[in-house]
Amino acid sequence: MTARPTSIPNGNAEDEGGQAQMAVNGTRPTKEATGQQVMGPDSPLPKVADLDSRSYASQEALVQDINESLRSAGGCVIRHLLSRETVNEIEREVRPYLDAAQPWKGDFWPPETRKVMGLMGKSEQFALNVVGNPVWQKVGEHFLTSVLADYWVGDEKQESVSAPQLNNTVIFSIGPGAKAQVLHRDDLIHHTYHPAAAAATHTLGRDNGIGFFVAGKKSTRQNGATRFVPGSHLWDYSLPPPKDENRAFYAELEPGDGFMVLSGCYHAASANHTSDQERLLYSTFTTRGYLRQEENQYLANDVDRIRRLPVWLQRFAGYSLSRPFLGWVDMGDPMRVINPEVQSQGDLF
């Protein structure tokens, strides 16, 4: 188990010296105000690690390097994370849903986009190998585990650990001619706001989500690879995305490669300039256990399909308690509703 950070309220991310960096009158802190150079659009671009998972002797060592790239750059590419056979099996399970999907009506995604959601109940292979990927799970535990320490219930001093949970599941099929999506942060759904952080400073507790993208087919800059702005997770959140997209990093992937990105980074799908290539991307996000899930897992999925998954994955999907006692059903663990035979927490209070 990775070290568990203490949760820090939004807008009060602390620097390594323990001093909270607060925005002054809603403006970005200056070097003079903080005593350190702060991160922003003009800062040097941090290096995004490109890691070959096959070269690591242990999963722990791979996770450590991923975590370091996420802290400094906000993103990381991991090669050969899933096998070609696995990504092909996922496509086989979801292709009927993609074929039936309707064009997006709106401006956020181009009409050439087809999406499938509710994948915990539609594709067992997606649930087990993308959402349940052990490397992805350990990265989420590191960044998004929350600890409420030293609180009192009567005369008893207690501590509660809230584990991360699933935030959403989406498969994207981006067809030829699709225009580029606008740069955005995904943690806006949780009303996240941070002032600028000191250069190269990242504090556990700052983040509310992490995205994980796996290429179902080859993803290139030409056919619409996900692009993101390295280091933008440490900018003042009041700053808009850069107009100079030469600062963007394009996550070009072979089938089975993965890309992880903190939800606080500016990112977007790019334009598909090809005439005959589909960009097929398997996507999931995780968030803190006490925050509302972006995708309502209880209505998006058939509970009978959820029951077929391993119990730990059912819990991760949200059929569990966020300690100490958030998310109960009849003052009890929701797991006993869908799996009465599973031992669950007793008296919540």
Image: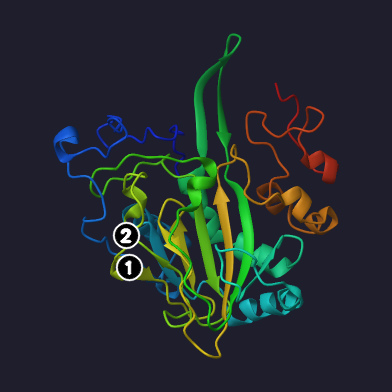
The residue tagged 2 is: 242
Callout 1: 10 Å neighbours few (<14), some, many (20+)?
A: few
Which residue was labeled with disc 1?
245
What residue do we see at 67% from left, 64% from top?
Answer: 128
Q: Is residue 343 left or right of residue 267?
A: right
Number of marks:
2
Q: Is residue 39 above or below residue 261?
A: above
Residue 1 visible, this angle: no
Q: Residue at x 54, y 46 (%)?
A: 189
* Image position, residue 126 (x, y; %): 67, 67
Identity of the residue drawn at 19% across and 39% down:
30
Most extreme residue toward the front is: 106
The residue positioned 67% from the left and 32% from the top of the image is 326
Residue 217 image position (x, y, % from top left): 56, 81
Is 348 above or below relative to 72? above
Amino acid type of the residue that numbered disc 1 sits on in the rendered structure: Glu
Q: Secondary structure at mark 2?
A: loop
The front one of 57 and 237 is 237
